[in-house]
Image (cartoon, rainbow, N blue to C red):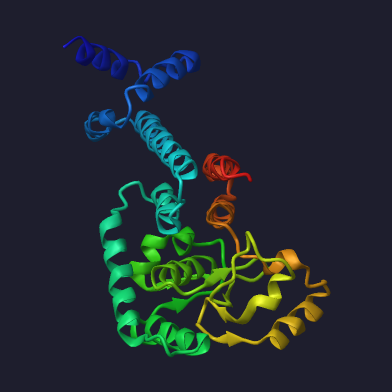
Amino acid sequence: MQANREITALFTLIDDPDEEVYSTVSEKIVAYGKSIIPNLEHLWETTLNDSIQERIEMIIHRLHFTDQTNELIEWRDSAYQDLLLGALIVSKFLDPEVNSTPVLQEIEKIRKNVWLELNNFLTPLEQANVLSSILYHYYHLKGVELSYDNAEDFSIQKVLLAKKGNERSNAIVYQVLCELLDINAKIINIPKLSIIAFFHSDYDPTTQIGHPQEFIHFYIDSTNGQAFSHKDIEGYFKKIGQEPKAAYFKPSSHKKIIQQLLLETAKCFALPINDYKQKELVYLSSLLDE
């Protein structure tokens, strides 16, 4: 009862014109955690004042952001940073109501369809052809141009349900499926490209000595599943006028992939009205510094 009285008292002060008072009030409300969101939503529905509604919306956003920050830290500190779960945390920033169950079901449906077509006698290129054929032709996943006009193109949930995404999100879907199917294919760090390298089955970047490119069979374009040869990649480096450094061919860690996804998503919020969201995404990315 005491808590309810305190919440009621805090809610009456949300409209206080003194910014210092409002700041103190909002901090105390946020301290209650996510469980207070239904109360805030009810208050928003019964409030006619636009400025008060905006303050309520901001408090709700802060509550969600605090929860997402804690979730990302827990993911970062876990023994194995599951790539799909990391991508879902980014999706939750864009839509706090994201339900992970349909996403996991879609991934499992695709995995099962690919698994049924695989066998131990297929070459890596044949494996890639099976996966790309099912993902891009049977499942109809489309690749859209990398743009910062639509943040949803970076959301793994929206990509799987709408069946279209940019090179970043599609590459994550592709790698997640490869990991579930025990295919040694990883996103690599080639500048201005998001492609997947099919490595030798026994390649381990933590123990193998030598240039990583020596252990790559070929590459896959994440937007459409098209295969690239070493010659194609050499031509690309000549075109952009850069040396093909060894670091570009090393598999990206899960933390690095999610960090890049956060930074790319942040670019979608360049307008002054969304500046706070951009800063929050950059902050989240900093939590994954290696």
Q: Decide: is 185 above or below 3.
A: below
Quarter-of-image position of residue 140: bottom left
**Residue found farthest to the top:** 2
Q: Residue at x 70, y 86 (%)?
A: 232
Kindly tell me whether residue 29 is visible in this rendering. Answer: yes
* Image quarter in which the N terminus is found: top left
**In this rendering, would 28 be left or right of 192?**
left
**In this rendering, would 210 be left or right of 203?**
right
Q: Position of residue 88 (x, y in %)?
A: 40, 54
Q: Decide: is 224 above or below 285.
A: below
Q: Decide: is 50 above or below 15.
A: below
Q: Residue at x 43, y 36 (%)?
A: 70
Q: Position of residue 43 (x, y in %)?
A: 25, 29
Quarter-of-image position of residue 134: bottom left
Kindly tell me whether residue 191 is visible in this rendering. Answer: no
Q: Residue at x 65, y 76 (%)?
A: 215
Q: Position of residue 202 (x, y in %)?
A: 56, 73
Q: Residue at x 44, y 78 (%)?
A: 142
